[in-house]
Amino acid sequence: MNRMLRNGVAVAAVTCVLSWAHATAQPVWLVSPEETEASSRAPAPAFTPRSVPAREAPQIELLSPQLPGPVNTPTAIELRFNSPVGASIRPDTFKVLYGGFQIDITNRITKVASITDKGIQVPQAALPKGKHKLTMSIEDREARTGVRVVEFEIN
C-alpha cells in the first residue's frame, strides 16, 4: 500500500509539472483588444512634458523585436539594461506603461519574464493587431531613471 501511495504521489507531481510547463509555453497577452482600442482612441495630450534625462542614467536597449519593421504576434521581447557609469541596475524598479492611457502592465510581463540587472526576456508576448506604444523605465542604485518609448504596429 505504501508503494502504491508513493507511485500515486509521483504521478500527481509529474502531472502538475507537465501542466505548468504547458501553461507557461503559451503566449501571454500583454493587453486586451479592448485596452488597445481604448488607447488608440485616447486624445493626444495638449502638451508633451519634456525633461532632460538624468546625466548618466541607465539605458534600455531593445534587442527584439527588430524595429522599425513588421511585428507579428506572438513575438519575443528582449531588452538590455546598460549603466554608463557602472552603477548597478535595480530590476525591481522596471516598469512598463501601455498606450495613451499609460496602463501599468508591468505585472503582466514580470509574471512570465526573466528579469535581471542585465535585462529582461519575454519569450512569447501577444498583442492584438494595431498600433502600440510601450513606455519602459528602469532605475540604478544612484536613483537615476532611464526611460525608453517604443512604438510599433502588429500585423
Image (cartoon, grey):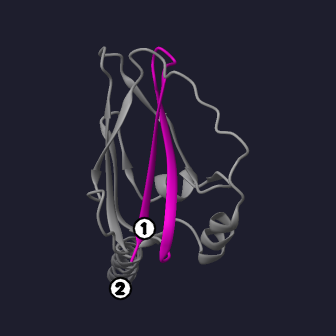
Badge 2 amino acid: Met
Q: Residue furthest front?
A: 46
Q: Residues within 10 Å of mark 2 (few under 14, many from 20)?
A: few
In the image, taking residue 46 as reference, residue 98 lies left or right, namely left
**Mark pair 2, 1: CA separation:** 55 Å
Identified at 48% across, 52% down, the residue is 110
Q: Nearer the viewer, residue 60 or 105?
A: 60
| Residue 92 in the figure: left or right of residue 76 | right
Residue tagged by mark 1?
153
Q: Image check: 50 left or right of 92?
A: right
Q: Quadrant of the C terminus?
A: bottom left
Residue 13, horizontal then vertical, whole percent = 38, 74
Region rendered in magenta: 128-155
Quadrant, the N terminus:
bottom left
Residue placed at 36% from the left, 78% from the top?
22
Asked which quadrant contains residue 26, the reply is bottom left
Which of 2/101 is in front?
101
Q: Secondary structure at mark 1?
A: strand
The residue that appears at 35% across and 16% down in the rendered structure is 87
Q: Nearer the viewer, residue 4 or 97?
A: 97
Residue 85's x, y, as percent? 31, 14
**Residue 118 vertical position relative to residue 15 in the rendered view, above or below:** above
Disc 1 residue type (three-letter): Glu
Residue 15 lies, in percent from the top left, at 37, 81
| Dominant secondary structure of the residues highlighted in magenta in the image | strand
* Mark carried by residue 4: 2
Asked if residue 151 is among those painted magenta in the image, a careful observer would answer yes
- Under circle 2, the secondary element is helix
Percent coordinates x, y for residue 60 in the rendering? 37, 37
Q: Counting residues from the N terminus, which is met first, the one under dot 2 or under dot 1?
A: 2
Q: Is residue 12 above or below residue 143?
A: below
Relative vertical location of residue 145 with respect to residue 98 in this rendering, above or below = above
